[in-house]
Amino acid sequence: MMFIKKLIVIYSLITFIAFIGLPKEVQCITVKQEEELSREVMKIVQKHFEFIEDPLIVNYVNKVGKNIISALPPQPFTYKFYIIKEDVYNAFATPGGNIFINSGLFEAMDTEDELAGILGHEIAHVVCRHISQKIERSKKIGIGTLAGIAAGIFLGVGGAVTAASAVSIGSMAAAQSLTLAYSRENEMQADQLGLKYTTKAGYSATGLLTMLNKIRSRQWFGSKQIPTYLTTHPAVEDRIIYISSWLENEKKETGQTSIKASYDFEIAHTRIISIYGDENRALRKFETDVKNYPSSAMAHYGYGLILSRTGNRKDAISHLKKALKKAAFNPNILKDLGRIYFLDGRFPEAYSTLNSANSLIQNDSETLFFLGRTQIGLGKPDEAVLTFEKLISTNPDYTQALYFLGEIYGKQEKFDKAHYYLGMYYNNKKQYKNARFHLYKALKIIKNQDKRRKIEKMLKEIKKNEAEIRKETY
């Protein structure tokens, strides 16, 4: 016990020293510069990695993140949370409040507390401005180069190679890269504050400890399989000792270290495994779950999703119906059942099921999208237009809806709207040649002044984006 108390005192002193250090105004780049750096890092991450854009999963992770943010003092940044489709264990935060978690790490979790523990730690890195404090304000290295270095560090050994190739890194930049990595003191400070934020938000601090143990256990697979998280977040062994000690003291003081149950976690976690995880691994998991837990709605839901993914829609529908018997009127299960009916060409059943889902979760983007496509399949273009227009009004970035809306208007010979929406679609897809064609066509015939202004703004942005692409090429 004496050793544990000494350990806590030592780590508290480390954290305190990290806080006082040099004055922040001497060490840090400005908030504006940090936001610029964040945008540049984001471009690199988007260029080299695939994001999961499933609204249910993205909204859920952002909800947990924002719950933790609510425990913070006022912040200079707007925090956003993203899921990268990567099997390796990793999570990282860029300067400026963008926080990323790999799907593989999310898949390894078992509770919402574990997700909160990881997010709380990454949020704390941003709050402390650990990376921005390490960047010299001398301007000897440009923001673009710094972004490449930072992205390489955050993404680990493999990511560093691809990310760093996006920028020209000289000897000065290479030296800077050594100072940008998180130190042991950074990690301890992020743990201490992260535990404070997550517990204040109502989560158990046990979550971070169990995740660190899971991440550490991956080392047994060999050096090439060491999780990226261990290379980007050092001192895991020391952190496990510290958090264990912290939890022991917390339990004595409050008598509580309860784990938070969450249906939202279960359904998001089931989707990320069955839809975005390794196909064979997901099949084995949910086959086993259905056998071992035949009364579990989530077991049948996950099995239905992975069966649909492999093309076995008949059995997928059967298991989703079983899931609905266990969780009657569950809007997410209804939505996926309707989606699979649509994919199987069973439009009447899809229409009925998706309408039921829409009545339970109005304005859900995925429900509206497949309802609109079902209406097209049933020869109801006017209904489909109303559905897609509603979807676009609530979620302007739902790119595929723009395409189908443009297609319908084209068939109805409403060419002003057809070119307008197809122009937006190709612009979002970064197919600028096609986007310019449709937007110029729309500009010639469209009369709505608001839409004309939007078109002119998009054309200016396209010109700017194409100039940046040419600059990168040469």
Image: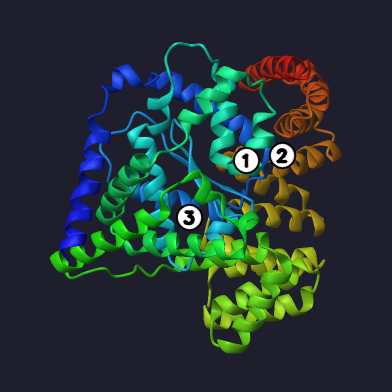
Residue 392's disc number = 1
Q: Distance between the residues labelled 3 and 2?
A: 25 Å
**Image vertical order of residue 201 relative to residue 265, above or below:** above
Residue assigned mark 3: 60
Q: In the shown orientation, is residue 107 left or right of residue 265?
A: right
User: Residue 51: percent from the left, percent from the top?
Assistant: 63, 45
> Which residue of the protein is positioned furthest toward the front in this rendering?
3
Q: How far apart are marks 2 and 1 (CA)?
A: 7 Å
Circles 2, 1 touching at the beta carbon (< 8 Å): yes
**Dot 1 alpha-carbon crowd within 10 angstroms: few under 14, some 14 to 19, many 20 or more:** many
User: Residue 441: percent from the left, percent from the top?
Assistant: 82, 21
Q: 294 and 87: which one is in front?
A: 87
Residue assigned mark 2: 402
- Of discs 3 and 2, which sits in the foreground? 3
Q: Which residue is drawn at 47% across and 64% down?
A: 265
Labels 2 and 1: the sequence-earlier one = 1
